[in-house]
Amino acid sequence: MTGNSSPLPTLPSGLYVTATPIGNLKDMTFRAVETLQAADIILCEDSRVSARLCRAYDIKAPLKAYHDHNGDQMRPQVMQWLEDGKVIALISDAGTPLISDPGYKLVRDVQAAGLPVFTVPGASALTAALSIAGVPTDKFLFGGFLPAKQDARRKALESVQDLTATLVFYETGPRLAASLQAIEQIWPGREAVIARELSKLHEEVRSGPALALAEEIDAKGPPKGEIVLILHPVAPQQWTPEQAQSLLQDLLQTNSVKDAAAQAAKQTGLPRKELYQLALDLKSKAEMK
C-alpha cells in the first residue's frame, strides 16, 4: 500500500471515522489508507503520533488536532469544512475512534446537521483482546478506563457487581495491581485476563485469579504498554424454592402480587408465571392468619 501510484478514489463529502492500527502498522486496511490519502483534512489526537502513520503510507493531508481539550472550539470549524464539501477523516492515536476516545460530540453534531458520517472500520484493542482471551463473548460490558482514585474505582466496579457478563476495561500499568486487588475484594477468586501490547512485538496474554495476578505484578513491577483487563463472567445465583419464597415474602410487604412476582423474576431469572402463583399462595396464607 505504501507508495501506491494508482488514482485515489473520489470520496463524497462527509466525516469518515477511520480506524488505525493499535500497534503494528501493517494492520492498516486498504480502505483506511485510501480514505486518508483522499481526505482534505485529518483530525487526530496528537499530530506527532499520527505523522508516523502518514509517513508510512504516503498520506499528505494536513493534520489538525481534535481532542477533549479543544473540541468545543474545533467543532464549528469542522462543521464549516463539511458544509464547504470537504472530506474530513477522524482518527485516534490508535485503534477505532470513539472507543474510549474523543469524538462522539462531533459525530452527533454532524448527524444533527444532516451531514453524512461514514465508518471505515479496522483495529480495536477491545475486540482484539476479546478474540484471544478465551472468555465468553456472547455478552460483555465494556467499562472504558477504570477511575484512578481508589473510592471511585471501587464504586465503578460495584456498579456492575451483579452483572453476569464478561467485563472489559482499559487500564494502565501503574494502576493495574490496585485494580486487580479491588476486583478481588468485590469478587473473591474471580478469574481475570491481562492482554497487553496487542499486535506488537511483546504481545502478552496472562490469565488467572485476580489476586494471583496482582501479587505477580507486585513482585515483578508494573507491566508496560497498553493494557486490556478482562474479567470472566460469574455464574448466576442458583435460587432454591425456599430462597425464592423468602424473597417473595419480603417483596409482598411493600408490593402487589403482580409487582412482587415481576421483581422476583428479574432478580432470580425464574419464570414469572410460577412466581406469580407462588406469590398468590403466600398472600392467601398470610390473609388467613
Image (tube, grey):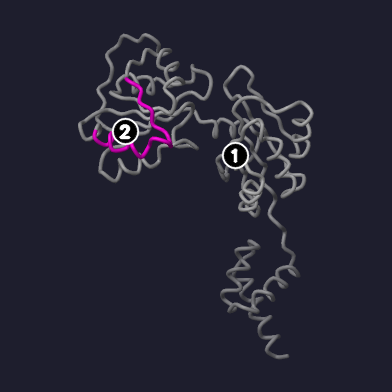
Query: How would you rate the neighbour count of disc 2 (Cα within 10 Å): few for under 14, some for 14-19, many for 20 or more?
Result: many
Badge 1 crowding class, 10 Å Cα cut-off, few under 14, some 14 to 19, many 20 or more, is some
Q: Amino acid at mark 1?
A: Phe
User: What numbered label is drawn on residue 184?
Assistant: none
- Per the image, is 67 magenta? yes
Instruction: State which region is magenta.
Output: 62-80
Q: In the image, what residue occupies the spot 69% across and 76% down? A: 249
Q: Quadrant of residue 231?
A: top right
Relative side of 57 to 88, left or right: right
* Residue lying furthest left: 84
- The answer to whether residue 218 is magenta is no
Q: Residue at x 74, y 27 (%)?
A: 221
Name the quadrant of the C terminus.
Answer: bottom right
Whole-angstrom CA distance, mark 1 to mark 2, is 28 Å
Q: Which mark is residue 15?
A: 2
Question: x and y percent of residue 155 in the render?
Answer: 63, 51
Q: Is residue 285 above or below residue 115?
A: below
Classify mark 2: helix, strand or loop.
strand
Residue 288 in percent (x, y) is at 70, 91
Between 243 and 161, the one lying in front of the other is: 161
Mark linked to residue 169: 1
